[in-house]
Amino acid sequence: MLFLIKIWSFSREHSLSAFLIVAVAGMFFYIFAENEIIYDPEKGITFSKGSPVSDQPSVTKNVPERKIIHTAPVRPVSSVSHSSKKEDLHINRKKDPPEVYFKSGLEYFKNGDFNNALKNFNYADSLTEFPLYKLWKAKVLRRMDKYQPMLALLIKITTETDNSDVADDALLEMAIHYKSINDYEKSLQTLTRLIEQYPFGLSSATGEELSSIARDQRRLIRQEMINSLAILGYQKDDLATAYHQFQKENDLEITGTGTIETVSLIKHLNEMTLKNHEKEIQKTKQLEKYQSLMLPVYLLLFGTITSLFVLRMKINSRKKQLLELKHTIIELDTGKL
């Protein structure tokens, strides 16, 4: 108040502009006296109602800061920390759309971090059950060699959501899995189902025509078995007949199809045949190498023998000449007598 009285006395001695200064000063005094300044991390500077400054001592309030935790799904992959502490996707953060976690999972997948990729895909799927998220969970599980949960997810997609855009992708993943475990019959059945049920299906990842890929895979599987059986001596016009004969002669269950046991044994026997063939090739190469090294020796020996023979011929010829010369000398000596 003393400050205002001094300003008022100053304004009486000076012009109208001083009066305006007094008015502005009084306004700021009222605002700061009746309101308390608070800094909020989100809203910035705000004023809250309080007692006049003259009534209470000036006290600074401790405003708790809201802790912000950056979790793995929303951070760029390039800035991912390699700390051993596990991060929680749920603590002190607002719910992000599942697409955020899905895209983050894709980045982790591309960089080979399958644990974090699975973590993000799982959380995206927990927010919104979407067949696409389950498909990528299955892809990650296959890379992690977790085949049982992978197969369960793929079967769920192809049975419960068979009208989705990724059901054909799931069938192709299943066919690849069956082929990897030598169950060629189930792989062929799955590929045939894909071709018949989704003739115009496109890959959700690359946009390729899946039915065309399935036809190529089915042809390659059959050609592989025809060639493998032919190497083992089971060359037949019909693949089923070749299977049947092979299974019968090797005490296997006779199905006429590419069961796991049948295909595994065919591959094993072919591998042994190829190894034996490689050994024979190595022996032949070594023999050829030895022969190539011995050829100069043979030539040298032949040349030596030839030279010795020529030398012997010359020696014999010289001996004959000496004998003739000897006889001539004797005859000359006898004539003198």
Image (cartoon, rainbow, N blue to C red):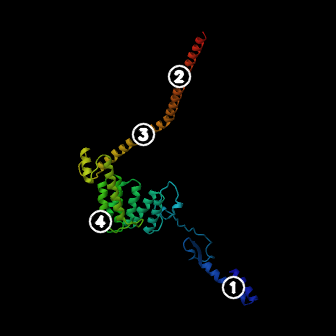
Label 2 or label 1, whichever comes before in sequence order: 1
Q: Residues within 10 Å of mark 2 (few under 14, many from 20)?
A: few
Foreground residue among 28 and 138: 138
| Disc nearer the start of the sequence (3/4) | 4
Q: Residue furthest bottom?
A: 16
- Which amino acid lies under the numbered mark 1 shown in the image of this protein? Val
Residue 157 position in % (x across, y down): 33, 63
Name the disc covering residue 32, or none: none
**Which of disc 3 and disc 2 is earlier in sequence?**
3
Specify few, some or many for label 1: CA neighbours under 10 Å numbering under 14, 14-19, or 20 or more.
some
**What label does residue 316 carry, if any?**
2
Looking at the rendered structure, the kind of residue marked 4 is Glu
In terms of depth relative to the viewer, which is nearer, 164 or 58?
A: 164
Secondary structure, mark 4, is helix
Closer to the camera: disc 1 or disc 3? 3
Q: Answer yes or no: do the residues labelled 3 and 4 have beta carbons within 8 Å?
A: no
Q: Label 1, on which residue?
A: 22
Which residue in the structure is indicated by mark 4?
Answer: 196
46 shown above or below 231? below
Q: Give the Cα separation between the discs numbered 4 and 1.
A: 90 Å
Q: Which residue is drawn at 41% across and 41% down?
A: 281
First in sequence: mark 4 vs mark 2: 4
Residue 249: x %, y % from top left? 25, 44
**CA–CA distance between discs 2 and 3?**
46 Å
- List the residue tagged with mark 3: 284
Please indicate, yes or no, whether residue 148 appears anywhere in the rendered image: no
Circles 4 and 1 in contact, beta carbons < 8 Å: no
- On the image, the x and y values in percent for residue 105 come to 45, 62
User: Identity of the amino acid at label 2?
Assistant: Asn
Q: Going 30% across and 61% down the picture, which residue do you hit?
A: 192
State which tag comes first along the sequence, 1 or 3.
Answer: 1
